[in-house]
Amino acid sequence: MISRENLAFISATSAGVILLFTIGLSRPDLLAEDGLVENLGAAGFAAAALLALSTALRKSAFLIITERNMLVGTSGLSLMLFLSEISFGARIFDIQMPQMRGGGEFDGGHDIIIVLFRRLSDAGRTSLLVVAAAIGPLLVTVIALLCLFRQQAQAIVRSVFLQSVRVSLGCGAGHARKRRNPRSHNVV
């Protein structure tokens, strides 16, 4: 069962996405590269990184190790998303980013995926078979470990997705919930 806080957060996020989509249809200039929405997104990621890190540092005595690690991880992920949104400072500081073979500049985190796909498509069938042969045993190992530690994996998933502060921080929103007793937490 989804808590009311999570339902409200998911509803607000969905409404925001629909609003941005509608704005994008009527005013595409707002969604353009270095436009208002991209800059607001970058500011949101920066705020989420700072909020998560400051919460982890200020409240470290009241957090269990899992909560602290999640906040630090969220801060790192939000920082990477912020840097990717601002193209790692390329346009702000007028830095020339390296050109990618096949077109475009390597100026964001998503470019790693583009480079991988281009390399795989250039490599041919033999390389695709080698990659599939390498990924196959890795995937079987991950599935076997998940089956072996099913209860622990389910507890982690419940712990992450059923508490509004973790869902919100995991989505980069930086939403924080007050607790009456900071030492209490839901153990699943």
Image (cartoon, grey):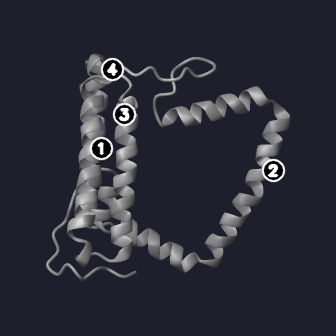
Task: Identify residue type, mark 3.
Answer: Glu
17 in relation to 152, above or below? above
Tell me the mark number nearer the camera, choosing from 4 and 3.
3
Q: Residue at x 71, y 66 (%)?
A: 141
Q: Residue at x 64, y 74 (%)?
A: 147
> Which residue is tagged 1?
45
Q: Residues within 10 Å of mark 3 (few under 14, many from 20)?
A: many
**Alpha carbon separation for disc pair 1 and 4:** 18 Å
Residue 4: which quarter of the image? bottom left
As helix, strand or loop, the secondary structure at mark 4 comes to loop
Task: Identify residue type, mark 2.
Answer: Ala
**Alpha carbon separation for disc pair 1 and 3:** 9 Å
Tell me the mark number nearer the camera, choosing from 2 and 3.
3
Task: Identify residue type, mark 1.
Answer: Phe
As helix, strand or loop, the secondary structure at mark 1 comes to helix
- Left-right relation of 125 to 168: right
> Which is more N-terminal, label 3 or label 2?
3
Tell me the mark number nearer the camera, choosing from 1 and 2.
1
Q: 60 or 25, which is in the foreground?
A: 60
User: Which mark is on residue 32?
Assistant: 4
User: Which mark is on residue 133?
Assistant: 2
**Alpha carbon separation for disc pair 1 and 2:** 37 Å
Q: Quadrant of the N terminus?
A: bottom left
> Which is more N-terminal, label 3 or label 4?
4
**Alpha carbon separation for disc pair 2 and 3:** 34 Å
- Left-right relation of 159 to 3: right
> Which is more N-terminal, label 2 or label 1?
1
Task: Identify residue type, mark 4.
Answer: Ala
Residue 61: which quarter of the image? bottom left
> Which residue is tagged 3?
85
**Alpha carbon separation for disc pair 4 and 3:** 12 Å
